[in-house]
Amino acid sequence: MSKELKPDHSAYRVWPADPASFSTRRMSPLAHSIDQHPLFQLDALQALANSLMSSGQCRFLKPGTTQGSAFSHDPEHPQGLSIDEVFARMEEPGSWLALYNVQTDARYRAALERIVDDLRPLVEREQPGIFLVTGFIFISAPPSVTPFHIDRENNFWLQLRGRKTMNVWDNTDREVVPATVVEDFIAGGVQVPFQEAFRGRSREFDTGPGDGVYFPSTSPHMTRTDTGWVTPGDGISVSLGINFYTSVTRRTARVHQFNRVLRRLGMTPSFPGQSAAADSFKAPMGRWLAAVRYRRLGATPPPGSY
């Protein structure tokens, strides 16, 4: 393997834009030099995509997708294009490709772990026990979007090439993400629906290479890429999402599992984090209930959910 494919990961770093104010409990701007990393250049990403295509890790949005659409994607290009054809035409308006779980490639797993290590001391002072680090790369040409959705994991989101606008909502905003919606998502992956009235409640980040955002588990978010920055030969946007769980996200998921049952019994349980005593009782009960539920369904539970 060439030296170009075995970069010195320590040369590429991520740091909080304002270290003094960084907290895992709220969204926070990041800065980075990962856009210079050789593994995240277009030729390397094309090679990666070719290696991931057969395992269904290349995902394509349906034509006409908007920020309010369901976040559904397919393992085949809508026109049946090969990966090399997709990259050859990537600057065509509306092109969109995502590479899922890139940590299955050992080189990218090492790069992701190095990025997390940069921020580990800040994360683990509040949320110890980082585990299951995963990576998602989004490659698109404007005008394009990633629909409104929430994730179970905490997220380091980095813009690597071109420009993109990221909207993120406070994960404690119950008007946007009611408790019942969060619980249904944690238990079964049911996504929160977007309403245009929500837009004004978000924080909007206009990002370019070297910019990033941290946001906590279950923070609603969506992106759009507009055409204003495009010049000939420079019309592709690339971003990287690094997702990870902690002992706190796992405990919170267990409390949500138990709260969902209590709510169906007509009760109004406190949200995770509002009562340490209640959470200490709910978390083990939620873990047990989730295990029983998934065993009965014959299903594999979502990672980090119980």
Image: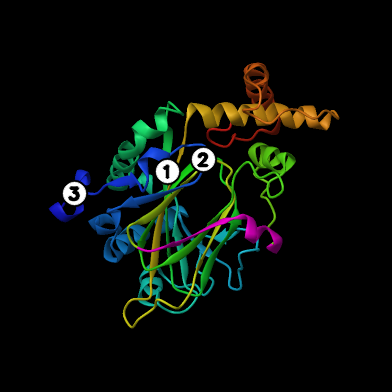
Q: Residue sitting at 40 percent across and 53 percent down?
A: 212
Q: Earlier in the sequence, mark 3 or mark 2?
A: 3
The quadrant of the image that shows the C terminus is top right
**Image coords of residue 260 (percent x, y):** 74, 32
Where does residue 234 sit, x and y in percent of width and height?
33, 76
Mark 1–mark 2 distance (CA, rounded to whole Å) = 9 Å
Please give the residue where the numbered disc 2 appears in the rendered image: 153
Q: Residue at x 59, y 46 (%)?
A: 170
Q: For the residue labelled by badge 1, is the local secondary structure a helix, a strand or a loop?
A: strand
Say the numbered circle drawn on residue 6.
3
Mark 3, other Cα within 10 Å: few <14 / some 14–19 / many ≥20: few
Quadrant in which residue 158 is drawn: bottom left
Q: Which mark is residue 85?
A: none
On residue 134, the disc is 1
The front one of 289 and 242 is: 242
Expressed as whole percent of the image width and height from the top left, the position of residue 264 reads: 82, 32
Using the image as rendered, state which of residue 146 and residue 295 is in the foreground.
146
Give the residue displayed 62% in from the left and 20% down from the top: 276
The amino acid type found where label 1 is placed reads Thr
Discs 1, 3 touching: Cβ within 8 Å: no
- N-terminal of the pair, mark 1 or mark 3, is 3
Q: Does any portion of residue 142 appear in the rendered image?
A: yes
User: Which segment did they paint magenta?
Assistant: 196-208
Q: Is residue 213 left or right of residue 121?
A: right
- The verdict on residue 182 being magenta is no
Where is 112 relative to 270, above or below?
Answer: below
Residue 11, position as x, y percentages in the image? 19, 48
- Residue 24 or residue 46, whichever sits in front: 24
Mark 1 and mark 2 residues within 8 Å of each other at the beta carbon: yes
* Vertical order, 287 against 303 (above or below): above
